[in-house]
Amino acid sequence: MGKPSLKTTSFKHHPVYVQKALHVDNPFYGPKPEYQRAEIVPGGDCQVVTNTFLAQTTGQLDVALASNGGRSGVVGDHCIRLTQTAHASKTAVYLRFIDSATQPIHVNLQYARFVGMWVKAGANDIFDSGDLTFYIYTKKSNYLYANAAMYIDFIDYTDAGDNVWRYIELELAQFTRNTGYEGDKLDEVWGIGWYSEDVTVSNTLDIDQIEFYTIGTGLGPARGLIMSAPLKDGIHAQRGYGLRWEPNSGRIDTSDANDHAFAGICVGNPSETRLTHDFDIGDTAIIVLDASLFEIGSAHIWDDDTLAGETVAISAVNRVTNTLTVTAILVAYEVADNAKIAMMGNEKGTIRVDFMVSGIVNIEAAEDIALGLGCTCATAGASLTVNKALIISTEEGQIIGKAVLAAANDDEQFPVKLTTDARTA
């Protein structure tokens, strides 16, 4: 009998091809590493105007340092102010990125999914949709709006006279892209700007802390620990929602101000994706970007014109053609209106939700949050505080979470800290 031999193969000089990949149906839920990159662009701290913020033409839309300082709690003591000096100016103010020697430089923003900044309109000023456009340019020296690589409507806001700070978060996927300006790459971005279309004379807009980031809450970057858990049956979550632990199943539900099981702020539903075609009333086949995110069950469909949207039942998922077979839709949805669809949670826990449980988060808060159980804001523009006499310290993070949910629209927005020692950031 011969001596047994062991055949071996060396891959040192041979390529290895993996033809099949493992699909995990039940991923691990709990704390998860997230690639969160949030960076202020050069000059985006809004501390100086010279050589950074420039006007396309003078005398119509001006830029200068605001005399009242910057947003309390963010970088620096200053902010910039855009002032409209002619009604229909159709001109721009742009921020060109420069180095310490005031030479133009470019930055790589391919990591970014969002751009955000703090803004404060002048008392009683009105900015209608289309009045101001925010744009990005990607070719050196082509700073003018006419050379914009990407652009989007910047603000639709009427100040109620309280002159408060608010946070604007813009999703890069919703920007309109111009051809010929490398707008899809964003690997060489030379600057950003605001284009004035038809703003009322003397309207002002203060701007502070311009940053690009990967994970957003709807009111800015998610700066903290992010967890993942399955959604409760029939529940649909979007960015910015307050979430709670559902005690009977250990899954996630949407929260309310009086809920003691506050879990965190939703930063994303992984099943959410965009539609790739326009669909009319009565259609039963929906084509999406990635059908692998879906299962048979209920889903929510909506767009910018129909934010309430509707619920549809998914009866089949074709992951080859990215087609979902659904019950007949009741409203027409268009790609141009940012049409989206997401699972609602009744797909037996295979769809999870990501939520931020601690760290810095921007919230909207009234002057007196009755349902916030101890969170108050003395005056418009003042810092959010927690009355420790009303609560025990271990509940403080939950209290801040309740304040997020109880706040009314159009009130002052604040950076706060979601931890057991919550304080203004």
Image (cartoon, grey):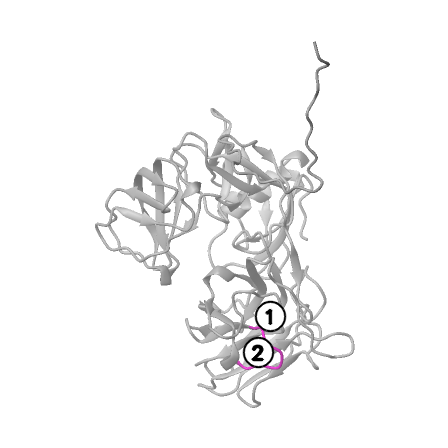
What's drawn in magenta, residue-wise?
137-144
Q: Position of residue 320 (x, y in %)?
A: 38, 44
Q: Main secondary structure of the magenta part?
A: loop
Q: Nearer the viewer, residue 58 or 411?
A: 58
Q: Amino acid at mark 1?
A: Ile
- Rendered view: 152 above or below 379: below
Q: Is residue 225 left or right of residue 309?
A: right
- Give the quarter of the image for residue 99: bottom right
Contact? badges 1 and 2 (CB < 8 Å): yes
- Rendered view: 163 above or below 316: below
Q: Is residue 107 left or right of residue 60?
A: right
Q: Nearer the viewer, residue 236 or 164?
A: 236
- Give the quarter of the image for residue 400: top right
Q: Residue drawn at (55%, 57%), measured in percent from left and top?
A: 113
Q: Secondary structure at mark 2?
A: strand
Task: Decide whether residue 143 is among the magenta residues.
Answer: yes
Q: Residue drawn at (25%, 42%), measured in percent from left and top?
A: 327
Q: Is residue 304 left or right of residue 371?
A: left
- Give the quarter of the image for residue 44: bottom right
Neighbourhood count class around disc 1 (C-alpha, 10 Å): few under 14, some 14–19, many 20 upward: many
Task: Decide whether residue 186 is among the magenta residues.
Answer: no
Label of residue 207 in the image: 1
Residue under label 2: 82
Could you tell me how far apart the alpha carbons at marks 1 and 2 are, in whole angstroms? 8 Å
Q: Position of residue 252 (x, y in %)?
A: 49, 34
